[in-house]
Amino acid sequence: MFLLLALVSVPVASGAEEFPSGITHPTIFPDFDPNAPACTAPPGLTKTLAYVQENEREFLGGVDHGLSMAAKDRGLDYRRAVVENDVGRAVQQIEAYRKDKVGALIATSSNPSAVSPGLQQVLWSGAYVGTIVPPPATLLLNAPQYATGKALADAAIAHIKSKLGGKANVVLLTQDSMQFLTPRFKAMRDALDALPDVTIVADIAPNTVSKEGGATTMKTILLVNPDIDVVLGSDAVVLGALQALRDAGKARPDQFLGGIDGEPEAVAEIKKGDSPYKASIALSSPVFGYAMGEYGADWLEGKSVPQAMDILPTALTKDNIHQYEADLENPAAVFADPARRAAYLKMYGNICYDTRDRYVNFPWSSEMK
């Protein structure tokens, strides 16, 4: 059980109005109470679920799949804007949705600080806001990042010991520029540093979290270190690294390439059996996308929803992929089954329209001590 440590709701001025700054101090929330009393339904908003999507990564496309299904199931209009990594477009789109009085908004961006003021404006309008990792949000999603990174590192270490004689040259393709994700890469370094014959030959963040970004970075690494045994990072960049290895004639069946996100292309590589791509730590984006949409609909009905949600990591291998794929195709069935849902998600805290000043405005993680 998690205990609530602090609630902070401090007004901040903006022009002639005063708005709450939300919970800004690190806070450990209790478990979500699905039977919490309902409150007021937000007035003056449309029954619309909107999604500002950072780019066309398959992981984010999975969020779209879940959101669109939830909107259909709950009778909400659904709107989506893909901003193609253009932060200015993201800011403009968030403002456009606010002016249209959308009742629920999900947003992702590579520049959280740039979109934060706009998201706060949407929150202050009374709408539900969901984000993936950075605040501010009515419902903030995060993975237990250290545990996620450790799960991937443990799978790589098992392969290094069983298939590579305990020796390996390792590439880490990081996202350390996103402070919220740094624990996953710390976990990888901590685990790999314990092996005396493992060398991290490159520890670098690609310019973009994309297949192209991973390929470009890997091509540069290969100029200096042509013999690579292990590559770890997000699925998008590791898939790009795999392409670069193949283009250079440096891909081998005994290599271990592993990623995080459970993207379909990574899953397809794992299913081949002879691919260097051996594992993906899945974060079930259609399942949590569906959950975000469901809670957005609940919010518009005046119900209490979670303030925070863990996306529980699942280590995918060729042995368990088929059930996982079935779950992603039909996330509604997963959400409706408490046992199946609990394998993917864990919810914390409670918030509704009447208590919206308690929105999450700090980088929440269930791993906080």
Image (tube, rainbow, N blue to C red):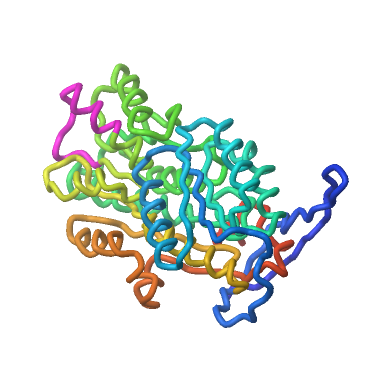
Q: Extreme top residue here?
A: 223
Q: The N terminus lies in which quarter of the figure?
A: bottom right
The residue that appears at 68% across and 53% down in the rendered structure is 361
> Residue 77 versus residue 114: which sits nearer the camera?
77
> Residue 27 versus residue 131: which sits nearer the camera?
131
The residue that appears at 46% across and 54% down in the rendered structure is 78
Above or below 358: residue 88: above
Q: Which residues are magenta?
A: 240-256
As for residue 245 lying within the magenta part, the answer is: yes
Above or below 59: residue 286: below
As for residue 207 lying within the magenta part, the answer is: no
Please state the horizontal and vertical placement of residue 287, each as a whole percent of the image: 38, 61
For residue 130, which quarter of the picture? Answer: bottom right
The residue that appears at 56% across and 37% down in the rendered structure is 90
Please state the horizontal and vertical placement of residue 83, each as a whole percent of the image: 48, 35
Please state the horizontal and vertical placement of residue 152, each as a whole percent of the image: 34, 50
Above or below 262: residue 212: above
For residue 203, which quarter of the picture? Answer: top left
Please state the horizontal and vertical placement of residue 181, each as a whole percent of the image: 51, 45
